[in-house]
Amino acid sequence: MNKLKAYIPVFFLIYLFADRMLAAEAILPLQIFFPGNFNGKTVELTDNLTFSSSDAHKIPDLIATFKKEKKNTLVFAAGNNSSIYEPLSFLVKGKIETELVKRCEPVAFSASPSDIEILDLKSDKTHLKNLLFTNAVSKKVPHPFKTFETWNLDGKTLYFFNFISAALCEHLPIQKWESFEADDFERTLRRLELKFKDSDITVSTVYASKEETEKLASTLKRLKGTHFVINATNEKEFPFYPFTAPIIEGNVYKFSLKNGNTALPLLNIIFKNTGSPRVTLRMLPLDKYNDKTGNNSFSDFEKQVKDYIFEPFRVISTKEKASTGANYIKPVAHAILTKRALNTDAALMIEPNQRHINNNVINLGRLLKAIDNDRIFVIRLKGNTLKRLTESLVSAYGKDKIAIAGCEFKYFAGKTVDFKISGISAESGKTYSLATTQATLGDSIARNVFKKDMLQPFNGYFLWDIWKNNLKTIKIPNDVIFE
């Protein structure tokens, strides 16, 4: 009995210190899913004009399973879902990806410039008001976006942000988005005057250069709280940060998101009463999980576009071309249709990337698979500048690779002579309107000729729209369009 009494103080001390240790290690587990980064490829149109679905359709069921097991589970839609370069995403204005994300029941919706660009303002008004664009600043009228979203969790406040670089907003259609401009990231945080506490958490998706992203991370590092900076990439970009091991700099954690069609990012955060949180990042491989209901939910979209895709626009008869394969769109056809559609004085562009159409029945699906999409811009430039631009591009790439409509000239020894526009000799000082592609504007030779102030604001014209809206009705013989 005396021995037991002697041990009582020891047990008391162990209990006391254990209680303090548990208090120090008391944890608040939180997991955040980031569905998104689909790049318009949740459902793809194959070369055989069939529909191919990615594993992204498994995501809503997968998240629902985790939510049953864990109380503190949130979903932050990462954005970067739609693409003007993917046929189905383009045709249904990104609705396939939008509906997929909505089924994940996110607490906040991020958006990339490509998501904003493709939106149908008439049918997507409600969704538009839910999109985060933290550094958007209203101009003449209030912009429609949310600045940030908050979520309270056991005394902690989570802030969800979405930052987009001004440079990535330059090609948003002016008639849709003239109500705002993108502000500097650091200036935005100062303007918001948010008083973060040590226990607060910020989660920011960032669509910007690495330099701008790093600058934002440095700004957040000086503020109280724990901050997660997320780089969402597309398949043409190299990720800034690791996928599964965040770069930790003080109170800032930086990571990139994988392709959302193959993996679902899951961020686990364990907050302790003292010290830094424990953070783990996983990219759940979607091919390892069963699909219960995902694919069925997209059949409506497939039905919506199926008849449209297979509707014949042109039929090349056997009298015109005996073979039923290898029809190729002549470069000049792009310029002819573009000039007529936009009613410009001329159209000039480097031949778009394109492939053969292996059928004499030309429908929308075959067109979209044969031609790479591009934005169409209108430039206003003087006659002598247009002549010099034509001369420079033809000299560099050859006349066969430059699509030209509305301009006539003779080319000899690297020079254009007898240069005419609409059949009349071009006047050096007169201003003409010229339609061209973004790819042409980005060419180093073209950039040496035209100045930025010649460029008119982007009005939302796309090469696919030019073909989709005009090939069926325009009165041009097949032999002018195809070879």
Image: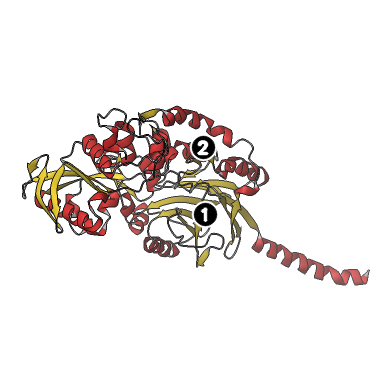
Category of crowding for the residue at label 2, using alpha-carbon neighbours closer than 10 angstroms: few (below 14), some (14–19), many (at least 20)? some
Tell me the kind of residue under disc 1. Answer: Lys
Q: Which residue lies under the disc numbered 1?
A: 258
In the rendered image, residue 450, in percent from the top left (x then y), is placed at 18, 54
Locate residue 231 relative to residue 185 in the image: left or right: right
On residue 51, the disc is 2
Image vertical order of residue 358 relative to residue 226, above or below: above
Tell me the kind of residue under disc 2. Answer: Phe
Q: Residue at x 45, y 27 (%)?
A: 307
Question: Badges 1 and 2: C-beta atoms under 8 Å apart?
Answer: no
Q: Of residues 89 and 171, which is closer to you in this image?
A: 89
- Cα separation, mark 1 vs mark 2, equals 23 Å
On residue 196, the disc is none
In the rendered image, residue 76, in percent from the top left (x then y), is placed at 51, 47
Category of crowding for the residue at label 1, using alpha-carbon neighbours closer than 10 angstroms: few (below 14), some (14–19), many (at least 20)? many
* Figure colour scheme: secondary structure
Q: Residue at x 79, y 66 (%)?
A: 12
Task: Choose mark 1 or mark 2, whichever is in front.
Answer: 2
| Residue 375 in view here | yes
Label 2 sits on a secondary structure element that is strand
Q: Of residues 392 and 37, which is closer to you in this image?
A: 392
In the rendered image, residue 275, in percent from the top left (x then y), is placed at 58, 65
Q: Of residues 119 and 478, which is closer to you in this image?
A: 478
Q: Residue furthest right?
A: 1
Label 1 sits on a secondary structure element that is loop
In the rendered image, residue 68, in percent from the top left (x then y), is placed at 66, 42
Image vertical order of residue 254 relative to residue 182, above or below: below
Query: Upstream in the sequence, badge 1 or badge 2?
Result: 2
Locate residue 322 relative to residue 479 in the image: left or right: right
